[in-house]
């Protein structure tokens, strides 16, 4: 079990690993420049908070909320977005 503060916040995981209702703070985009620019244009910017809203019945695509916008991405796309997992308060403190 991780402790409060730095326990969870320093760990980077793919955005696709978060469960419905979980939050993270975007750290980096790990894909081609063109695709990273597309994600950036959609609001997936390093430092932004993102929450998993829901998953389709077959778990793909996944609906995310980022910068007050809901966006669906396929798992293979969200695999390339690295986040610091945590609650909104923990994620905001990073």
Image: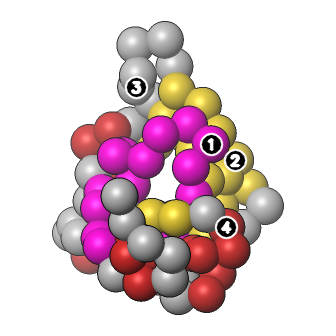
Q: Earlier in the sequence, mark 1 or mark 4?
A: 1
- Mark 4 element type: helix
How far separated are the C-alphas under marks 3 and 1?
A: 16 Å
Residue in the picture at 23% in, 70% down? 30
Q: Is residue 6 visible?
A: yes
Q: Nearer the viewer, mark 2 or mark 1?
A: 1
Q: Mark 2 or mark 4: which comes first in sequence? A: 2
Disc 2 to disc 4, C-alpha distance: 17 Å
63 is higher (above) or lower (below) than 58 = below
Q: Which disc is residue 70 wearing?
A: 2
Q: Secondary structure at mark 1?
A: loop
Image coords of residue 34 (percent x, y): 30, 69
Image quarter hosting the N terminus? bottom left
Residue to which mark 4 is pinned? 88
88 w.r.t. 15: above or below: below
Label 3 sits on residue = 60
The numbered dot on residue 21 is 1
């Amino acid at each position: 079990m991780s402790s409060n503060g730095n326990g969870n916040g320093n760990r980077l995981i793919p955005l696709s690993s978060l469960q419905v209702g979980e939050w993270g703070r975007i750290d980096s985009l790990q894909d081609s420049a063109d695709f990273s620019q597309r994600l950036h244009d959609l609001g997936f910017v390093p430092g932004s908070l993102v929450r998993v809203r829901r998953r389709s019945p077959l778990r793909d695509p996944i609906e995310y909320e980022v910068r007050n916008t809901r966006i669906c991405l396929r798992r293979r796309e969200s695999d390339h977005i690295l986040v610091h997992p945590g609650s909104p308060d923990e994620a905001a403190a990073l």
